[in-house]
Image: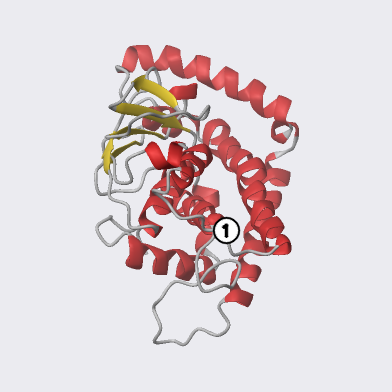
Amino acid sequence: MAAQNACKQPSITVFRGWKDAGKYVWSPYVTKLETRLRFAGVKYTTEAGSLSVAPKGKIPYIECRGVSSISTPIVHEESPESKVLLSDSTLIAKTLVGWKILPDLNSALDPLERSLDMGLIALLENKLYFLQGWERWIQNYYTMRDHVLWSIPYPIRVLVGLIVYRKNVAMFHSQGTGRFTAEEISESRREIWEGLSALLASRSSDKSSDNDKPFWVLGGEHPTEADTCLFGFIVSALICTAGPISQSEVRSFPILLDYAGRIHDHYFPDYEKWAV
């Protein structure tokens, strides 16, 4: 019912946490969401936004204007009949699919392919995210603090940063990543990139040298949800200066750069590309 009542082409604003228009941001989830929209050709604008306004207190979130008569529990209503706020990259995509604004990328997958797609996303979001996050927040804290807390004046940023740091130390320990040594974390992180590199190499074996079209992680003719997530994590690793080891690891796999470069050139030609 929500899909029938919702406007098919609302005005969408993506709140990314930073003001840098025309550039990728460090969050893999922001790029994942933007990629999902661009795969479907859905136009949107970007703003920095605020965690104090974001549903669930998470970046990214979006604002949809021109949406009416919403009746889904996933939606967070700000102003009925005019504006709806949605949070969490996965739930945003799921909601927009339900409203027929986005296509279901995985509709044609068989059960085995769906399981593989879900498994790849889980590997990235439930494991690699924490391995990369530990490098950023623990090993390169000051760089990460000043980037993430850019909007807070410096004296206050120091205090807030300490609070965030202590919370992250506790979170990484509770989650498990913080219980390993730096060498063990780095090895686990590289193993993931090695596995993804090998998978992409097997999927791209039929591409010719003069074909610059994107290829996809499941090897099909069209992208799936896993592609939006993988592209987001590759870009995040390539541009985040608080993760120099991850950046070096990704750059050591040419197939990862080729995969991400093709998607960038095809879907993000207006964005500044990472340094070669």
Residue 123 higher or lower than 92, as above or below: below
Using the rendered image of the protein, determine whether residue 164 is visible from the camera's viewpoint. yes
Q: Quadrant of residue 171?
A: top right
* Left-right relation of 238 to 108: left
Q: Residue at (44%, 42%) from the top-left corner?
A: 3
Nearer to the camera, 203 or 197:
203
Q: Residue at (53%, 27%) from the top-left corner?
A: 73
* Left-right relation of 259 to 153: right
**Callout 1 crowding tier (Cα within 10 Å): few <14, some 14–19, many ≥20:** some
Q: Position of residue 211 (x, y in %)?
A: 40, 83
Residue 264 higher or lower than 235, as above or below: below
Local SS, label 1 = loop
Q: Position of residue 75 (x, y in %)?
A: 46, 28
Q: Residue at (43%, 27%) from the top-left corner?
A: 145
Q: Position of residue 162 (x, y in %)?
A: 50, 16
How many marks overall? 1
Instruction: Identify which amino acid the numbered label 1 is placed on.
Output: Asn
Q: How is the image coloured?
A: secondary structure
- Which of the image's four quarters has the C terminus? bottom left
Q: Quadrant of residue 5?
A: top left
Nearer to the camera, 16 or 89:
89
Q: Position of residue 143 (x, y in %)?
A: 42, 34
Using the rendered image of the protein, determine whether residue 26 is visible from the camera's viewpoint. no
Nearer to the camera, 145 or 18:
18
Q: Which residue is mark 1?
A: 106
Q: Residue at (48%, 44%) from the top-left corner?
A: 98
